[in-house]
Amino acid sequence: MNQKPLVSCIIIFWNAGENFFIEAIESILAQTYDNWELLLADDGSTDESTAIALQYAQKYPEKVHYLEHEGHQNRGMSATRNLGIRHAQGDYIAFLDADDMWLSHKLEQQVPILESHPEAAMLYGRTQFWFTWMENNPCSWHPEDKEVDLLTITSMKFNALIQPPTQLILFLKNKDIYPCTCSILIRRQVFENIGGFEENFCNAHEDMVFHSKVFLQAPVYVSSECWDKYRIHPDSYWRRADMQGKGIEIRRIGHLKYLNWLEAYLSKNKIKHLKVWKALKKALLPYRYPILYQLIILMRKPKRFLIMLAKQIVINRHC
C-alpha cells in the first residue's frame, strides 16, 4: 500500500486541440512522484479534446478519470475546476491547464514541503512564462513575436511560511505579484473550509478570487523554485484578446470586478484588517475617482505636472 499522500491532479479543458493537451497530460504521467490521480474535466469541448481525454481514461483506468458537466455543457473555468474538486479523492489538489506543463519533479518536491509545514494551506513557487516552446514549432509565430522566457514574481519573500493577509496586500499593491494556478499544491480541506472557485468569475481574475480567500485566512508557503511552464501562445485567452486590441480593456474590467468582489467579500465576512482595506481603497481609487487619481500622480511628479500645465496654457492662448 502506498504510504505517500494521494494528490488529485485536475486538468480543465475546452477545445484544447491535440498537441498542447497531450503534452499537459504526459507531463503528469511523467511525474517521479507516483501516488496521484488525474481528473480530466471537460468544459463542453466540441473538438478532438473529448476523445483524447476518454482515450487516456480508458488506457489508465486506475489513474485517469474523465469528467464533464451535465449535458456536456460549457460552464467556464471556475465551474469546471469545482467539478474536478468535487470528484477529487486526494489529500492534496493540484491544477494544470491544458496548454501548460509540469516539470517531472513537481510533486516529488512539493509534497514533502507541504507535509513539513502542516499549518500551510497551500504551497506555490515561481512559474516559467514559456515563450521558447515555439523553437520546435518554427511556423507558430513570426520571428519578431518571439520573446525570452521569464519567471513570475509571486512574492517579496521566498522559501518561507507567510502569514495572512500578506500575499493579498502584495497583490493589491502590485497586480504582477500572484501565483499561477498551475504552480499551487493545496490541501483538500481548504476547499471544505472556504469553498471552491467563484463560478460567476469565468476567466479574468477567477484564480485570484480564490487565492484571495486563502490569503485572508491561512498561512501559505512560497518557494523560489520553478515547477511548471505557462505556455504563451497566440490561441490563449489573453493573447487572443491582446491581438484583437481588447486585452487592456478586458484586464481593466476584470480587475475592477475583482476589486468590487473583494470589497463585498470583506464586508460580508466582517473582515476589518486595516492594511487590507487601505490597500483595497488605494487600488480602487483610479476606477472610482479617476480625476483625483491623476491629480495625485501628477502632484507626486511636480516636473511632469508643470510641463503638462504649461502645455495647457499654450493651448488655451491659441484657442
Image (cartoon, rainbow, N blue to C red):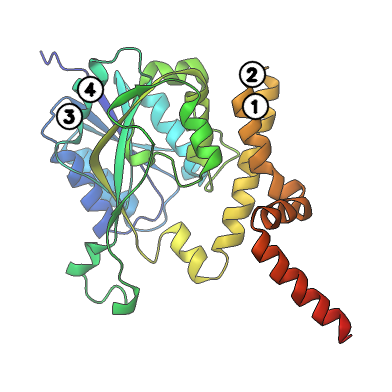
Q: Residue at x 42, y 25 (%)?
A: 86
The residue pinned by badge 3 equals 109
Q: Earlier in the sequence, mark 3 or mark 1?
A: 3
The one of 175 and 53 positioned closer to us in this rendering: 175
- Mark 3–mark 1 Cα distance, whole angstroms, equals 34 Å
- Residue at 19 percent across and 68 percent down: it is 135
Q: Amino acid at mark 4?
A: Ile
The reply, left or right, for residue 208 in relation to residue 276 is left
What amino acid does circle 1 point to?
Tyr
Residues at marks 2 and 3, CA–CA distance in whole angstroms: 35 Å
Q: Position of residue 265 (x, y in %)?
A: 65, 27
Disc ID at residue 265 = 1
Q: Are marks 4 and 3 in contact (CB under 8 Å)?
A: yes
Label 1 with label 2: CB-CB less than 8 Å: yes
Picture coordinates of residue 106, whole percent (x, y): 20, 35
Badge 4 or badge 1: first in the primary sequence: 4
The residue identified by callout 4 is: 113
Is residue 199 in view?
Answer: yes
